[in-house]
Image: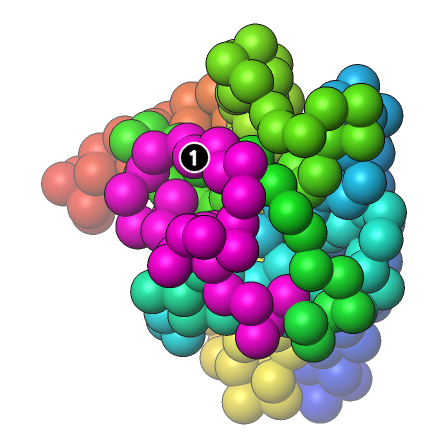
C-alpha cells in the first residue's frame, strides 16, 4: 500500500466513523432529552390541573431564557421563544433562584404581559420553579392557571419542586453527554483533513498494519466512552490523564 492510497483509506475510514457517531448522537441526545422534558411538562400540567406548562433554559452567552418545551394553551408559539433574563416572572426566578407563586399576575410588575400576548395566551396565575444543578440555575419550569382553583398553593409548590429536580437532572446529564460527544467529533473531524491524515500516516512510519489498526481502535474506544454514564466517563478520563502523565515523564 503506497502513501497516497493509505492516506486516502485512513481519511475515508475516519469520515465513516464521524458519520456513525453523528448518527448515534442524533438518536441519543436531542430527541430523547426533549421527549423526556415534554413528558415531565405534560405530567406536571395534568397533576396540577393546569391550563399550560413550560420549561425554559438559560442561554448564558445571549443572556436569555429559551423556551425548550411547552404544553397546553399557546404551546406552539411558546417553544423557541426567547426572553431576557431580566424580563418576566421566569427571568426573575432565573436571576434569584427562588420559586414564585402569583395568584394575580396582572397586579405584579414582574409579569411580562407583552411576551405573554405574543403567545396568544395571557395567564391569570403562575407557579414558577428554578431548575438548579450544583447551585447554578440552568432554567425555569412554569405551570399556568390551575383549572380547579383560582391560584396555586404551598403543596403545589412543593410538588413542582420534585418535577423541577427531575427535569434539572435530565437536562444536566444530556448537556454533559452532548459536550463530550461534541468534543470527540471535533477531534475526529480534525483527523479527517487530508493534511492531518498525511501526518498520521507518516507518524505510523512505513504504514504498519498493526499500528494503523491501533489508531482506529482508539477512535472506536473514544466513541464507546462518549456514550457511558457520567461516573464511568470521569473514571476513563482519569485513567487517560494518569497514563499521559506517565508517558510524558518516561518519554
Please tell me in which quadrant of the rendered image residue 188 appears: bottom right
Q: Is residue 73 magenta?
A: no
Tell whether 53 sits left or right of 133.
right
Residue 17 visible in this rendered orientation of the protein:
no
From this view, report whether residue 152 is shown above or below residue 35. above
Please tell me in which quadrant of the rendered image residue 121 appears: bottom right
The foreground one among 233 and 103 is 103
Tell whether 135 sits left or right of 208.
left
Residue 135 visible in this rendered orientation of the protein:
yes
Q: Where's residue 62, x and y in %?
A: 40, 74
Magenta extent: 89-116
Residue at left offset 82%, top offset 60%: 74
Tell whether 32 sits left or right of 225.
right
Determine the secondary structure under disc 1: strand
Please tell me in which quadrant of the rendered image residue 99 appears: top left
Quadrant (top left, top right, bottom left, bottom right) of the N terminus: bottom right
The foreground one among 248 and 35 is 35
From this view, report whether residue 63 is shown above or below residue 127. below
Residue that carries the numbered disc 1 in the rendered image: 100
Residue at left offset 57%, top offset 10%: 155
Residue at left offset 82%, top offset 46%: 71
Q: Where's residue 180, x and y in %?
A: 53, 49
Residue at left offset 49%, top offset 46%: 139
Tell whether 18 sits left or right of 238.
right
Q: Is residue 115 magenta?
A: yes
From this view, report whether residue 16 is shown above or below residue 190. above
Q: Where's residue 49, x and y in %?
A: 81, 26
Q: Where's residue 40, x and y in %?
A: 75, 30
Amino acid at each position: 500500500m503506497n502513501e497516497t492510497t493509505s492516506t486516502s483509506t485512513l481519511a475515508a475510514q475516519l469520515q465513516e466513523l464521524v458519520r456513525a457517531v453523528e448518527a448515534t448522537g442524533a438518536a441519543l441526545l436531542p430527541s430523547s432529552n426533549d421527549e423526556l422534558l415534554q413528558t415531565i411538562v405534560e405530567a406536571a400540567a395534568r397533576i396540577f390541573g393546569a391550563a399550560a406548562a413550560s420549561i425554559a433554559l438559560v442561554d448564558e452567552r445571549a443572556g436569555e431564557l429559551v423556551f425548550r418545551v411547552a404544553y397546553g394553551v399557546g404551546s406552539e408559539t411558546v417553544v423557541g421563544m426567547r426572553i431576557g433574563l431580566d424580563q418576566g416572572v421566569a427571568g426573575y426566578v432565573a436571576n434569584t433562584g427562588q420559586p414564585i407563586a402569583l395568584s394575580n399576575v396582572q397586579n405584579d410588575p414582574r409579569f411580562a404581559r407583552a411576551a405573554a400576548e405574543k403567545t396568544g395566551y395571557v395567564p391569570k396565575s403562575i407557579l414558577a420553579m428554578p431548575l438548579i444543578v450544583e447551585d447554578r440555575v440552568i432554567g425555569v419550569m412554569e405551570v399556568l392557571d390551575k383549572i380547579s382553583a383560582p391560584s396555586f398553593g404551598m403543596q403545589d409548590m412543593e410538588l413542582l419542586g420534585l418535577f423541577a429536580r427531575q427535569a434539572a437532572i435530565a437536562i444536566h446529564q444530556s448537556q454533559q453527554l452532548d459536550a463530550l460527544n461534541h468534543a470527540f467529533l471535533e477531534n475526529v473531524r480534525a483527523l479527517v483533513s487530508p493534511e492531518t491524515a498525511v501526518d498520521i500516516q507518516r507518524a505510523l512510519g512505513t504504514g504498519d498494519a498493526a499500528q494503523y489498526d491501533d489508531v482506529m481502535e482508539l477512535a472506536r474506544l473514544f466513541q464507546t466512552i462518549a456514550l457511558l454514564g457520567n461516573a464511568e466517563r470521569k473514571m476513563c478520563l482519569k485513567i487517560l490523564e494518569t497514563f499521559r502523565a506517565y508517558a510524558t515523564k518516561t518519554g
